[in-house]
Amino acid sequence: MLPGFQYLYKGEVNTEIMKYLIKKGWALEAEDCGSVHLASLAGMDRNDIYFQALYKEPAAIKAVIGTCRFVASSLKEIELINEAAAGNLAPGHLEVIGITVIAEAYDDGTMPGLIQS
């Protein structure tokens, strides 16, 4: 492991895996709402739980507002996240999100994400 980096785990989760990730200071890319809730209940900081909004229903996004950081691949996803978060935020504020960016040179038209140009 390289010092100064935070590692991101993507895969199946259970209580033991969550304890390990928290102990090591790793982050989680959660696949579903259940994984977000498990990580949150285990004590993982919301800033270390990443939830892809891609192909998620508005109800799934709303179910995890306040317990994770969202990653969006399109403007539509950003709008969905902010609509779901609207009742939980102060007026004029937006949900903090990450975005998936694709370097223009690597864009083959099949990868989800915002094109860097």
Image (cartoon, rainbow, N blue to C red):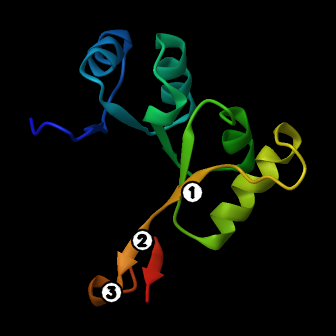
Residue 111 location in percent, x, y? 38, 74
Task: Tell me the residue that label 2 is attached to.
Answer: 101
Can residue 111 be seen by looking at this rendering? Answer: no
Q: How many marks?
A: 3
Judged left or right of residue 62, residue 15 is left
Looking at the rendered structure, the secondary structure element under dot 2 is strand
Q: CA distance from mark 3 to mark 1?
A: 20 Å
Residue 96 location, x and y as percent? 63, 50
- Circle 1 residue: 55
Identify the residue position indicated by label 3 in the image: 108
Going from N to C along the chain, the mark reached first, 3 or 1, is 1
Along the line of sight, the residue nearer the viewer: 62 or 94:
94
Mark closer to the chain start, 2 or 1: 1
Specify the quadrant that holds the C terminus.
bottom left
Badge 3, how many Cα within 10 Å: few under 14, some, many 20+? few
Tell me the SS state at disc 3. loop
Q: Residue furthest left?
A: 1
Looking at the rendered structure, the kind of residue marked 3 is Asp
Separation of marks 3 and 2 at Cα, in angstroms: 13 Å
Identified by mark 2, the residue type is Val
Residue 64: quarter of image: top right
